[in-house]
Amino acid sequence: MSSIFNSIIFKDRILLISTAFCLVFLVAGFFVVYLNIGELTSPLILNFDETLGQDFFGNVQSLWFLWITGLVVVLANIFLGHFLFYRERMLSYLIFGITALFSLFHLISVIRVVSIN
């Protein structure tokens, strides 16, 4: 347990803030899905385009799959940024920053799917 708290993420302020934003956005997305999943009925509109209209449909489990996919991408990026920290610090900062931005876009996409349906 002590090795988790000795991680570089907790020692570097930029990585800690970026990871905190990722976790806040992912938890917010989880609660958006969890609180609205009972009100949604299949088929769900997963993509709506102005020119093509509704072009991608799914069921209720697709919304959970969307959230879990975002979680896996964020965890993989955090692991990669942590691994590269001592070799390429700037690249590690870039990965963590992009991961925080990805988490924000992921939250927006989850909210968008829930609000369309």
Image: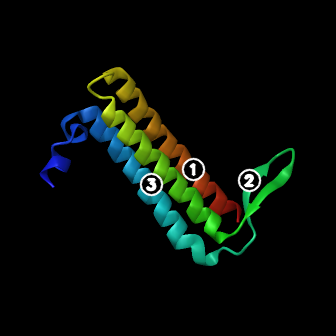
Is 61 on the left-hand or right-hand side of 58?
A: left
Name the one closer to the observer, 42 or 77: 77
Between disc 1 and disc 2, the foreground one is 2
Name which residue lies at 29% across and 28% down: 85
Q: Residue furthest bottom?
A: 38
Tag 1 residue: 108
Residue 88, compared with residue 96, is above or below; it is above
Tag 3 residue: 26
Name which residue lies at 34% across and 43% down: 19
Q: Quadrant of residue 9?
A: top left
In what element is the residue under mark 3?
helix
In what element is the residue under mark 2?
strand
Query: x and y percent of residue 13 in the render?
Result: 24, 34
Query: x and y percent of residue 68 in the render?
Result: 51, 58
Mark 1–mark 2 Cα distance, whole angstroms, equals 13 Å
Sequence-first tag of 1 and 2: 2
Which circle marks residue 47 in the picture? 2
Mark 2–mark 3 Cα distance, whole angstroms, equals 20 Å
Is 102 on the left-hand or right-hand side of 16?
A: right
Q: Residue furthest right?
A: 52
Residue type for callout 2: Asn
Q: For mark 3, does the 10 Å Cα neighbourhood hold few (<14), some (14 to 19), or many (20 or more) residues?
A: many
